[in-house]
Image: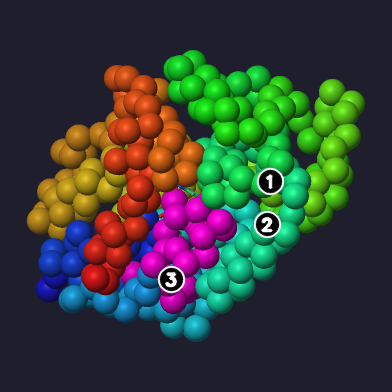
Amino acid sequence: MSKRIAIIGGGYLGAELAKSLDDTADITLIEPRSHFVHTPSMIRALVDPTLIDRSLIPYDKLLKNGQVISARATGIDEVVVSLDNGTRVEADYIVVATGSSNATPFKPVGNDIEGLRQANRQIHDQLMAARSIGIVGAGAVGTELAGEIAHAMHDKKITLISDTDRLFPTMPDKLGNELAKKLRDAGVTLHLGNRAENLQSMTKPYAGSLKLSDGSEHEFDLILPVLGSRASSELLENLPGAAKSTANRIKVDDWLRPSSLSNVFAAGDVADAGDGMTIVAISRQLPWLSAMLKGLVAGKELGHTKRYKPWGPKAPILVPLGPKRGNSFMSLFTAGDFLTRKMKGEGLFITKYNKLLNRS
Ligand SMILES: Cc1cc2nc3c(=O)[nH]c(=O)nc-3n(C[C@H](O)[C@H](O)[C@H](O)COP(=O)(O)OP(=O)(O)OC[C@H]3O[C@@H](n4cnc5c(N)ncnc54)[C@H](O)[C@@H]3O)c2cc1C
């Protein structure tokens, strides 16, 4: 009988892992959302809502042999996943890939795909009507958002606020400096090293005033908080030996195990394997995890598999500022407009992920 693998969460990690193992084992993907959410294009979708349809991709064609169960996992032990519909899925191996939540309108709240569509339309309308826009948080999402709005809507007064002294402080200086220069050239005001003291919401856009740590106050027609991802780790946090790290993530060992249960694995945003909370990190974890599970299915012992090694400080990052400009760190060098546009800015990987889900 072929081995049963239950994968909990069909985001970047879970969906691609399920597909890569579909011919190898008996796969059950447990995912409560009707659609895969392609986050890189959700930023541009705020200025161009026509992108929404191809950024929310139905799961119905993902697997040929295995099944996708539309339910939320509520508990796991070594061999069983309990679901919110009262049923149980038995498995030889369990992979938890429950990912993370983020601000509206970039990821759905729970399973609410229709709510995400509506939030995209509503905030797009608010953006169109707004003259002054404050973006709080200058990670990749905040920086890209400032660049997308500046590119598509020339009449807006955009302010990007970050408590770090420069953009992308953990990366080589050139990346942050060039992005900051391009944003300023496009008319964006940067308040760096400055914390917003009185944010009314950490996750939802609103109109109001912001008091910054330098004492200044600023009125905005629209404030967009983009303060980073928070892991959805409820299923893992009470497993024996599980330990939390930053952003609610759960630490995993060198074989991506979050607890003392030897056949339960975790990867992607929920798992702290030493990588960032990015698709780039997943692009490294996926082939390792897929090969490791294929080995286990074929009878290999886990101890004979090479340990997973995270990217470390050389993890690449691609930061478009709209479809034409941007900068990227490519592990060995910093790339400018041309490469950033070709690799990500033009197409935002929308075609790649529609193909992954077997959509034209
Ligand atoms: C706006 C935005 C843009 C981004 N752009 C980029 C980019 O350009 N490049 C990059 O590298 N990274 C980017 N990221 C980060 C990237 O989106 C995340 O790293 C990625 O989504 C993580 O994938 P994942 O599979 O771990 O989790 P997720 O994509 O969060 O998927 C988790 C899945 O698990 C499901 N789930 C949760 N709980 C349960 C449960 N109890 N039972 C069953 N299913 C459950 C959810 O419904 C969800 O479908 C971006 C993030 C945002 C917010």
Determine which residue is flagged by label 1: 156
Hey, what amino acid is under mark 1? Lys
Q: Between tags 1 and 3, which lies in front?
A: 1
- Residue 157: x and y, percent? 71, 41
- Residue 309: x and y, percent? 30, 31
Determine which residue is flagged by label 3: 53
- Residue 231: x and y, percent? 55, 50
Q: Real-space Cα distance between discs 1 and 3?
A: 26 Å
Q: Real-space Cα distance between discs 3 and 2?
A: 20 Å
- Residue 59: x and y, percent? 35, 74
Classify residue 357 as left or right of residue 84.
left
User: Which residue ends up furthest to the top in the rendered image?
Assistant: 173
Q: Is residue 238 above or below residue 211?
A: below
Whether residue 160 is visible here, answered yes or no, is: yes
Hey, what amino acid is under mark 3? Asp
Tell me which residue sits at (69%, 25%) in the image: 192
Query: Local crowd at mark 2 within 10 Å, few (<14), some, or many (≥20)?
Result: many
Decide which of tag 1 and tag 3 comes sooner along the chain: 3
Classify residue 271 as left or right of residue 359.
right
User: Which residue ends up furthest to the bottom in the rendered image?
Assistant: 86
Tell me which residue sits at (61%, 68%) in the image: 121
Determine which residue is flagged by label 2: 127
Magenta stretch?
A: 29-55
Tell me which residue sits at (45%, 63%) in the image: 51
Q: Is residue 69 above or below residue 228?
A: below
